[in-house]
Image: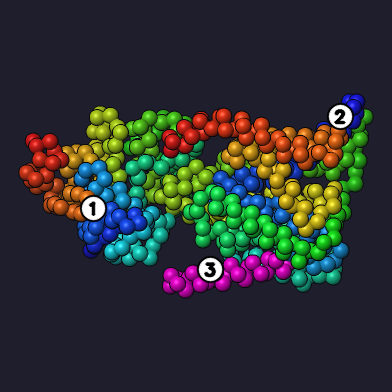
């Protein structure tokens, strides 16, 4: 059974359909990427999947019908989103942001302690800045905090919306290295990116989304060499 | 005016400022978490004082009826919601939080009507009776429109104030009441006669602001409330349910309002509609802090109290004018510094 299965998903803002009949599936342990140009509906798709936007179609997470679960219930089941805007708690310290990341499993004190130690281990920069307000962090640090906060919820599926957006190239490489390393934790990932090359290098399977519809899909390695994809998204090499 | 009169006025002002402070903190708390400027908030304070007065006389306070009506309505609404989403297994939870808990203090009062209980018990019962009002109103009125604009929420809050005012008249009648003094001790501090009641008010506002600070700084729930205030989407994405934080903000705010109601009821005659002016003055204090900063709200509330006290000495007819006239310079100053606020928000 797929971890996340999406069938015929449509999302509309008023009369404008931003996502039309999208179907995709993520198997446990997989990293799946959705690439596509700005405005293709990638963020809309993720926000609908996590329950922030109304949608039509069929979606299920580990067999549970997502139409019957709200955002908070998704988080409790280990289905989390790291949004494009990060949505951190700017006025709270790094440590408090992480603490609140584990809010959905707040009764599991021992597990949370372990997760916090793991996050600090994975992101030593966050450890150094644990007392600092989140709003004082640099772009890369904010992305790391957003990832760390999501990891505190002990996710089984993580939706990542443009994790490399606005980051310096060196940091982008670091972020993708971290994403690849999450696989060891047993976290499956749905990665939405404009940085198609880095995304396809990291992922197992890829979809190409254009104006709200999926136009190509296949194993990431195949897409990397598919002339239609390379021409539009990988600079023709 | 000599130094002695100035001192008396200052003490008086600080005492009323301390009341506005407690209510102002509650207003800011509720606004930050829910974006609702809860206009009927002063009514919560007045209703506590009125309930306490009724209990003192062995009467059944009108609040019992108000709470019962609200609890039944909220329970019906929530149950209908459960039926519609086919989640009837959560019915016991709904009944407990919307029916049993709100009605428990009302029931306790119902069965002890006629006997006059000891004062601490009366105070606890009056507080417990009033606490569920705001959360139940939130469930009935604001939850269905939680994503509406601040302006719409404010308009609804004003309408709600008028509705509550009418209900207050219905349940409490038009007579003014005063409760027994909490303490009749008079202290002589360095030649000044100080009412222990005044000190009690000031001490209570210091203690409860301190507790509120500790709550926000050191508890997970407090941090969750702050997180909701800072970034609602972010809060939802870590599993913090806005409806539940809103209920908690209303509860906590009502506790502050209730306590101030208990504190002022012995000092001022309370009518069913006394809450409105108290709430408005607390609101002026909260505007100092742009409805966001707790410490600045506290300072603003004390300033409002002082200003009111001195204004009533010089020209008591104009004291409300002076206090509300203060809004104009504050709003000017606030809009001049608005640029910074917007920048901060843009960062998030």
Q: Position of residue B6 (x, y in %)?
A: 86, 29
Q: CA distance from mark 2 to mark 3?
A: 54 Å
Where does the C terminus of chain A fall, quadrant-wise?
top left
Residue at x-position 20% and y-position 49%: A210
Instruction: State which chain disc 2 sits on.
Output: B
Where does the N terminus of chain A fall, quadrant-wise?
bottom left
Q: Is residue A191 visible?
A: no
Q: Is residue A96 visible?
A: yes
Q: Is residue A230 left or right of residue B34?
A: left
Relative height, residue B174 to residue A164 (above, below): below
Q: Which residues are magenta?
A: B64-93
Callout 2: SS:
helix
Q: Which residue is mark 3?
A: B78
Q: Position of residue A116 (x, y in %)?
A: 41, 42
Q: Which residue is mark 1?
A: A212
- Residue in front for this viewpoint, B169 or A112: B169
Q: Are marks 1 and 3 on the same chain?
A: no
Instruction: State which chain disc 3 sits on.
Output: B
Q: Are marks 2 and 1 in contact (CB under 8 Å)?
A: no
Instruction: State which chain disc 1 sits on.
Output: A
Magenta stretch, overall SS: helix
- Residue in front for this viewpoint, A206 or B283: B283
User: Which of disc 3 and disc 2 is earlier in sequence?
Assistant: 2
Residue at x-position 76% and y-position 39%: B321
Q: Which residue is mark 2?
A: B6
- Residue in front for this viewpoint, A148 or B61: B61
């Amino acid at each position: 059974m797929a971890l996340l299965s999406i069938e015929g998903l449509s999302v509309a803002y008023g009369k404008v359909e931003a996502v039309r009949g999208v179907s995709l599936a993520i198997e446990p342990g997989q990293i799946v990427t959705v690439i596509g140009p700005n405005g293709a509906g990638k963020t809309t798709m993720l926000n609908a999947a996590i329950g922030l936007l109304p949608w039509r179609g069929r979606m299920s997470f580990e067999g549970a019908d997502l139409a019957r679960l709200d955002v908070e219930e998704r988080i409790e089941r280990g289905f989390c989103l790291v949004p494009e805007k990060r949505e951190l708690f700017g006025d709270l310290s790094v440590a408090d942001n992480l603490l609140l990341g584990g809010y959905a499993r707040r009764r599991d004190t021992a597990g949370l302690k372990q997760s916090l130690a793991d996050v600090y281990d994975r992101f030593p920069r966050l450890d150094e800045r644990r007392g600092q307000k989140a709003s004082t962090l640099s772009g890369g640090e904010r992305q790391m905090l957003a990832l760390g906060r999501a990891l505190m919820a002990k996710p089984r599926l993580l939706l990542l919306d443009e994790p490399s957006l606005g980051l310096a190239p060196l940091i982008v490489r670091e972020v993708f290295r971290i994403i690849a390393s999450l696989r060891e934790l047993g976290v499956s990932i749905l990665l939405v990116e404009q940085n198609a090359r880095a995304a396809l290098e990291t992922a197992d399977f890829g979809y190409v989304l254009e104006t709200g519809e999926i136009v190509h899909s296949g194993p990431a390695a195949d897409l990397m060499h598919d002339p239609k994809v390379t021409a539009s998204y990988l600079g023709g090499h | 005016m000599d130094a002695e009169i100035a001192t008396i006025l200052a003490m008086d002002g600080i005492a009323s400022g301390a009341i506005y402070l407690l209510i102002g903190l509650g207003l800011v708390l509720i606004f930050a978490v829910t974006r609702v400027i809860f206009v009927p908030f002063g009514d919560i304070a007045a209703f506590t004082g009125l309930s306490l007065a009724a209990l003192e006389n062995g009467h059944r306070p009108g609040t019992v009826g108000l709470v019962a009506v609200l609890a039944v309505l909220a329970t019906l609404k929530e149950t209908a919601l459960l039926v519609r989403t086919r989640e009837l297994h959560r019915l016991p939870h709904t009944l407990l939080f919307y029916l049993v808990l709100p009605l428990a203090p009302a029931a306790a009062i119902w069965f002890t009507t006629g006997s006059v209980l000891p004062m601490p018990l009366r105070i606890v019962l009056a507080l417990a009776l009033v606490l569920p009002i705001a959360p139940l109103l939130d469930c009935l009125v604001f939850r269905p429109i939680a994503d509406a604009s601040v302006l719409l929420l404010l308009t609804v809050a004003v309408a709600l104030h008028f509705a509550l005012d009418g209900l207050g008249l219905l349940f409490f009648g038009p007579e003014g009441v005063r409760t027994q003094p909490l303490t009749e001790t008079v202290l002589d501090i360095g030649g000044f006669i100080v009412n222990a009641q005044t000190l009690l008010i000031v001490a209570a506002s210091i203690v409860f602001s301190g507790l509120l600070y500790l709550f926000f700084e050191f508890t997970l729930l407090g941090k969750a409330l702050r997180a909701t205030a800072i970034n609602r989407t972010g809060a939802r994405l870590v599993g913090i349910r806005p409806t539940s934080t809103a209920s908690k903000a209303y509860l906590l705010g009502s506790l502050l309002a209730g306590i101030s109601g208990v504190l002022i009821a012995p000092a001022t005659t309370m009518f069913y509609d006394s809450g409105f002016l108290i709430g408005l003055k607390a609101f002026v204090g909260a505007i100092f802090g742009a409805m966001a900063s707790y410490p600045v709200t506290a300072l603003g509330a004390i300033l409002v109290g002082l200003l009111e006290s001195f204004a009533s000495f010089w020209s008591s007819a104009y004291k409300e004018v002076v206090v509300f006239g203060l809004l104009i310079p504050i709003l000017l100053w606030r809009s001049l510094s608005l640029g910074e606020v917007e920048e901060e928000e843009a960062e998030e």
